[in-house]
Image: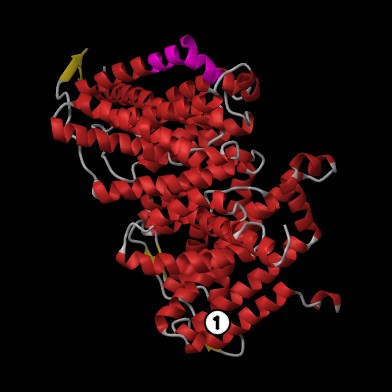
Amino acid sequence: MKRRFKPTLSGCVLAIAVIALVVIGPLLPAGLRSLLIDIMIFSIYAMAFDLLFGYSNQFSYGQATFFGLGAYGILLPVLHFGVNLWVGLLAALILCVVFGLGLGFISVRLGGAYFVIITIIFNMVFYLLSLDWTWLTGGDDGLTFTAPPVDLGLGQFSLYNPIVNYYFILAFLVVSYIVLRRLVESPIGKVLIAIRENEDRASLLGYNVFRYKLLAFVVSALFTGLAGALYALRNRYASADYFSIILSGEPIVWTIVGGSGTLIGPIIGVAIINPIIYYVGVFWKHYLIIIGLLLILIFRVSPKGIMGVIRSKIMGRG
Amino acid sequence: MDPMIAEFLNRFILVLTNGFIWALIVALVALGLSLIFGLMEIVNIAHGDLYMWGAVLAWYGVTLTGNFWVGVILAMAVMGGVGIVLERGALRPVEGIPAYTVVVTIGIGYILQQVALATFGGSPQKMPDPFPIVIEFLGVRYPGYRVFVAGVSTLALLGLWVFLFKTSIGLWIRASMQDREMANAMGVSVSKVYAVTFALGAMLAALGGALASPIVQVFYLMGYDLLVLAFIIVIVGGLGSLKGTLVAALIVCPLESVMTLIVTPTEARVISFLFMAAVLLVKPKGLFGA
């Protein structure tokens, strides 16, 4: 037990960051708190993408599929059957695992460029269907629902209270980070990294590459779905836009800018990019041009993103 | 014959013909995508936006001069130039690493879309029919423009074939596709071949967009729809296989078109997707993949 809690520099920084988030939550102005909630939800989405790309070298451009499935996975049961929050969340996660297995079974074994293309295609299929099947999804207008209260056994808390909402999301972010961190540092994570570095070698060593990559794909789908479900809860709304291909591009931007294969990098990416979009988007609707230039130039500046710069310049590691 | 069956047959033939003509346009776009991937391993996410710009430029050309040919030539010339700039300026450092090319071409796509939104505007525009004549054949009335499109795209496909298989530049492109280092060692300027190929792909996409503009609505996000269709075709045919791309276009587009008789266009796209999934399960590298 003792060894597990050996303090590291990054561990201390993270602990301080979490304590800071806990303390400042109630003190923040409403607008900034709302932005921070978005950043925390998208951080889960970004880490889920990093597990897929940064740790198992599967570059997906279709993760919004699972974001949308997670959102509708909680919205529909709550709306139509009045289930409580935990049952709704569970339904969303199960839905994402089932579709993750199905879509992963087709796409994961292909790898490389085929994988990218297939994920785009299935994302577009889901997006078009969500636009078309308005009886189920509400299409472009979407569906609104009442967020059920958080029942912790001790008492019920309403998500309509912004402070409750803030801590609710923060708790999920911390849990997601811990689970994903432990996963990538477990023996399974080491095998994923081995596959990322050299798939043929990992295969020759006797590892079932397909199964490990499928596992990463499904776990990524699960956490992406969690982010989608939390986003639907926070907005009490979901629409076909939750499946949009633009939303699939966002974790790519965050992860590449922040630094892939680090889990923290993508969070930094969200924390930098989203405020830019939030503030620039107000007075310049073509802010995607900035993102576009960033994506074109990032590999010339630092192929490993911001975390790459931090690691080489500050911590002296390659 | 039962008039209901006759009516259905009439519609079936009409829809099937539409599907084949659409296949020729889509084949132009998909062949560019396939060429670019086959040579440089660029997964060009911005390809749909090059097609969109072809349609937008054609719209400008036709609106300003009233001559459809001006629109087509404007679209191809401008996008060819843009293609060279993009390949030299943005893609050169990441060629050969598919994931990185996706990131860079997503960026290019965003910029192309936003520039179109800023200049062309956000509302879909309808291009007037350049040849508003109706051709009647065996009692079936068919819009003259579509017949014209079939002719032009067939000529363009033949032209592409001649270019790739009968000219020295085409020989260099095919040689570089087979073995880049060997081609380079034999004195082929692979760097120039790359720029020419990307420009060629962009021009084919622009031609597709220009030809499609009177049939579909011109819109700054129209590229995504075609990108997905082109990707399905490229995957079914086998990535980088030109023959496969052409054959797959001639299978998938008519299939989707005929399906719209029974289901909605979106559900027809889902059927194409399932068809692709089935092909992949049987032949993971597509019909003609190496």
Residue range in magenta is: B157-174
- Rendered image quadrant of residue A109: top right
Camera-side residue of A285 and A86: A285
Residue on which disc 1 sits: A167
Residue A223: where, in percent of width, then height?
60, 63
**Taking B54 as reference, is B92 left or right?**
right
Color style of the picture:
secondary structure
Looking at the image, is A234 positioned above or below residue A256? below
Image quadrant where one finds the C terminus of chain B: top right
Camera-side residue of A91 and A141: A141
**Taking B174 as reference, is B219 left or right?**
left
Q: Is residue B167 magenta?
A: yes
Q: Is the magenta stretch mostly helix, strand or loop?
A: helix
Near mark 1 (Cα within 10 A), the count class, few <14, some 14-19 or many ≥20, is some
Observer able to see residue A306: yes
Image quadrant where one finds the N terminus of chain B: top left
Q: Is residue B47 magenta?
A: no
Camera-side residue of B172 and A314: A314
Q: Residue at x 33, y 38 (%)?
A: B52
Residue B238: where, in percent of width, then height?
56, 27
Looking at the image, is B283 positioned above or below residue B171? below
**Taking A167 as reference, is A29 left or right?**
left
Q: Which residue is drawn at 68% across and 65% down?
A: A180
Badge 1 element: helix
**Taking A79 as reference, is A112 left or right?**
right
* Amino acid type, residue under disc 1 in the picture: Tyr
Q: Residue at x 13, y 29 (%)?
A: B66
Looking at the image, is A60 positioned above or below residue B270? below
Q: Residue at x 48, y 48 (%)?
A: A296
Q: How many marks?
A: 1
